[in-house]
Image (cartoon, grey):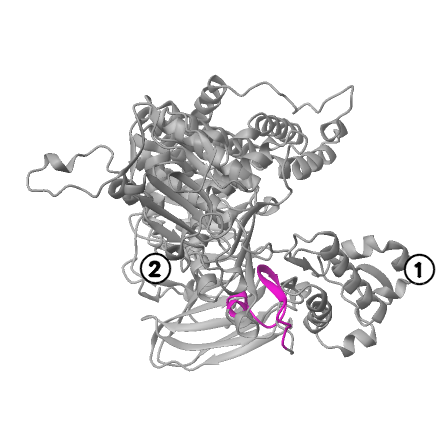
Amino acid sequence: MHQTRPTPPGVVVCLLLLLAISPLALAGESPPPAELVLADSGVARLPIVVADGAAESTRAVARELADFLQQITGAAFAIQTGDGSRGIVVGTLAEFPDASLQPDLEIREDRDGVEAFAIRTDVSDDRLRLIGATELGASHAVFRFLEAVGCRWFFPAPEWQVVPSRPRLAVRINESDRPKILSRRIWYGYGYFDRREGRCQVDYENWARRNRMAQSRRIWCGHAWQTIIRDHQAAFDAHPEYLALVKDERRGPQFCVSQPAVRQIATQWTLDQLRRRPELDMVSLEPSDGLDHCQCESCQAMGSVSNRVFGLANEVARAVAREFPGKMVGLLAYSDHSEPPTFPLEKNVYVQSTAGFIHGRYTFDELIELWPRHGGNVGFYEYFSVWLWDFDMPPGGRGANVELIRRRIRQYAEQGATSLDCESGNNWGPHGRGYYLANRLMWNPEADVDALLDDFYQQAFGPAAETMQRYYERLDPGTQPLVSEHLLALALRDLDEAARLAADRPDVLARINHLKQYQHYVRLRWEHDRAENRDAKRQWALEALTHVYRTRYSYMNHWEAIRQSWVRNAADEFEVPEWAVETAASRPPWKNDAAYTSADTAAAFQDDLIRFQPEPLVEREFSRNLVPGGFRTDAPAESFQRYQKGARYALYSRTGEPLELAITTGIIAWYRDRPDARYAVTGADGQAVAAGRLPQDGQEHPLRIEVPSAGLYWLEVDDQGAAWGLRVAAGRPVSLSLTRGNAPQHLGHMQRMYFYVPRNTRRIDYFWNGGPHVVHGPDGAPVAEIKTRGKFVAVDVPDGSDGQVWSFSKLALGQLWFFNLPNYLAASPDALLLPEDAR
């Protein structure tokens, strides 16, 4: 039988349910296919049927189905056991056999099919079948059916659940499906914040189950060596030689893998895990987090760290295969074992390649292609959100970037990934849209992203859909937003407009209120980060912590990460240990259990609207064709800059002479084991001219690049985060091209950097997010000292100072973007390249 992918949700509802339109009323139209009526006028027409020996998980899902159907129709649906000849049948193919479903529900190699399901409408038999290859597949069939009739579970908080009202529910749905990526997880770093009550975990698990986020094979590739050491502490204490030798000292957290006893301990520990926990599909043998692998002669003789780590995994995997056929050993391709070993892996070794913390010769994009060629059991590990990286602040982490999510998941699927683990946070304010989309794409990487997003906006926000689309898109990191008070002001006004449009929709208003609460956190953190004195910073921190604690069950912010990280750090920073300690006699001052009401939300939101005001500016566009500015100087300067992260430079050959420059790599010595730096030179037409790799050796590498003709060329450098420097001799045209988005960070203050102010410019307008700097006029005299960050900067241009070169001093480049000037900087006026239409 042909396997189909789910039709986009809105299309399913329109084509399959036909609840409100009567085509018979349209002259010349043939009647639609017969539908199965499940409920009408508050009365259930069919019971829900499970097999007599159905698993408790299936019975629980049947109860959820009955509950949702009652919410939809107002009818109470009975649950009974039976043979599946009539009713809404929920169960497995084994419980309700049908040879015609066998091809769609076949469990293939590598557990492909564990989650397969089929939905069949048999009108003549008064039967709707929701059948899975397993109990998990049956659960997926139930929630796919509910999705088809209009239910949504966008975020874990109950307010983000959508349940339609359909007093008459009639359907004709026939589809089969299974996930493309077999094991899919979006999970919270730092865990859940209410382990005692459990509501946070229940809400998350409900969201995952209802959105079909599950694992056909339960992946376990996390750090494990530290656990093995702890579980055998007496042996490691008695034999320090079992631990890695680092700088002539035996210490953890890594093994000395050349020790036969260590290899035996690792093997026995793995087998014991499988003996005690037969439900496991694999056991991790991943090293402890961090570096410091053994430097003893015997370990060094085994080759690279990858050879040692995966060699041990192979040995253990062979023992596992003998005692537990089908079970696996899991590891990450991570840190100093990011690369494949020089030998084949055992068939029961499973590897997840990580999207960060890579050391060795290859970039992650290269490893994405390399690992699947080395072995078939491959998945990937993404970093959607890490609190210490994004702090729940706009524009968010990778999990907020729609285009990156779309591109990466399709790339992983094309390489045959069978798992995707996404380290994330319980921070649905900045990342919720991305988490929801990513989960849908992990099931079907070819799903229509635009249709999924349109469904999200329409279903979650109804009459405010267009406004909320604008809100999310303006904050998406893929659009390179300038995270400024202006941006926050516009986002707040989007929410204000959305609330007015949805004034008669309390369900929509509840969701908008959650986002208002998130934006209030943004305001409090914004003020904290920019407070001018310690007392003010402490007060903003206390307000922010109190706010996030009170709103923690909206899941807009990752409270558990904040509690474990910010609370403890703030207690130390402000010397208030009571913030981090709770006793029977005292509670931390932020622990306010008063309900956060709609009135609280409204009051805070009005304050935020007043605090952040739009600063409308007209951005001037310039030609991309650059030419030498023709400026003279008595003392031409060499161009010499040093950055962490890549940058783009414009170079110019006046007569067709070669481009001459020098690139220093690996400036940060700690990162010299990262992949080689890459450079590429292209012409003005985008055609490749030269490209190469440079070792991260801390040395300067002179380059002489032959070019086909005189004119403009572009240099791009990717330093792999190890930091790099560019040197170009005085007298050669070279200019740094500024970017709106994630700018490179200059290492320390730059040399005096020059920029051009076009004729008739009366005010220089630019965005700045970085440290203090000084603006100098064309005569070199200081005009303004800038100390703000995350704001628009305005500097008046005196009469006669336009049409000339200005400069910055004490500039440590952060995020800089001119609105009405060309976005190019040079170390000398004569080196400055300008758009041909700028002068």
Q: Is residue 753 left or right of residue 32?
A: right
Q: Where is 478 relative to 159, above or below?
A: below
Report x, y in % for residue 630.
35, 66
Residue 835 sits inside the magenta stretch: no
Quadrant (top left, top right, bottom left, bottom right) of the N terminus: bottom left
Question: Does the rendering let one see residue 828?
Answer: no
Q: Where is 643 relative to 664, above or below?
A: above
Report x, y in % for residue 2.
33, 59
Amino acid under disc 2: Met
Q: Dot 1 surroundings within 10 Å: few (below 14), some, or many (20 or more)?
A: few
Do residues under tags 1 and 2 come within 8 Å of each other at their CB atoms? no
Quadrant (top left, top right, bottom left, bottom right) of the C terminus: bottom left
Report x, y in % for residue 509.
39, 25
Disc 2 target residue: 1
Q: Which segment is the magenta one?
A: 344-368
Residue at image point 35% right, 62% down: 834
